[in-house]
Amino acid sequence: MANSQWGVLFVCMGNICRSPTAEGVFRHKARQAGLLDRLLIDSAGTHNYHPGEPPDARAQAYARERGYDLSALRARHLRDDDFERFDQIVVMDDLNFSTVIARATAAQRGKVQRLLAFAADPAIRAQREVPDPYYGNAADFRRVLDWVECACDGLLANIATR
C-alpha cells in the first residue's frame, strides 16, 4: 500500500453474514494484539444485494455472544479500487474466489486468498470454504464463528510477521 497500513478486505457474496463477521472478529483480535493502527480492515460483497444495510441480525447476535460488535458495519459492493487499496483480499468460498479473481488484473490475483487457508486447525483448513449460514440455524452461525476465529488467528499471525 501507499501508506504504512496493511490492508485486509474480507469478501463474501452479500456482505451481511460471513465477511462482516470476519471483519469484526479480525478487527477485535487486531485491537487485542495492539496491531489495529497498522491495519486497514474492511469487508465487501461480490453481489450488491444489501448496500448500506447492517449485518444480518443473527450474525450480530451470535458475534455479540462472543464479544464482537458488528453493529457499526454496513454492507457494500466490491469496487475496482479495492484491488489497489488492499494488500490482501480474503474470500469465504470458491464462488467468491472465482468472482474476485475474474475482476482482478493478473498483477492483483496474488492478493486473493481463501480465509480458511489461514486456519491452524487442519480439519478446518481442509474445509476450504466458510459456509454461508444465511438459510441456516444457530449451529450454522456458531460454526461460521468458530472457523472465522480460527482462521483470523492465523491471518493475524501471518500479518504480524511482516
Image (cartoon, rainbow, N blue to C red):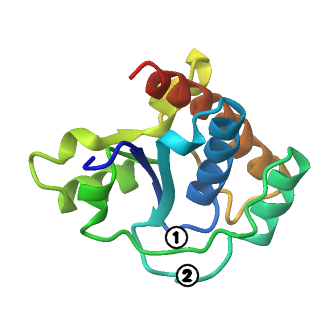
Left or right of residue 111, residue 104 in this image: left
Q: To which residue does mark 1 refer?
A: 14
Farthest left residue in view: 106
Farthest right residue in view: 65
**Amino acid bearing label 2:** His
Q: To which residue does mark 2 refer?
A: 50
Q: Residue at x 18, y 56 (%)?
A: 104
Tell me the quarter of the picture where residue 159 sits. top left
Left or right of residue 155, residue 162 in this image: left
Q: Residue at x 90, y 49 (%)?
A: 65
**Amino acid bearing label 1:** Gly
Q: Earlier in the sequence, mark 1 or mark 2?
A: 1
Residue 96 image position (x, y, % from top left): 38, 55
Please indicate, yes or no, whether residue 129 appears anywhere in the rendered image.
Answer: no
Mark 1 lies on a secondary structure that is: loop
Q: Residue at x 26, y 57 (%)?
A: 83
Residue 10 image position (x, y, % from top left): 48, 52
Q: Compare residues 67 and 34 and report the one nearer the observer.
A: 34
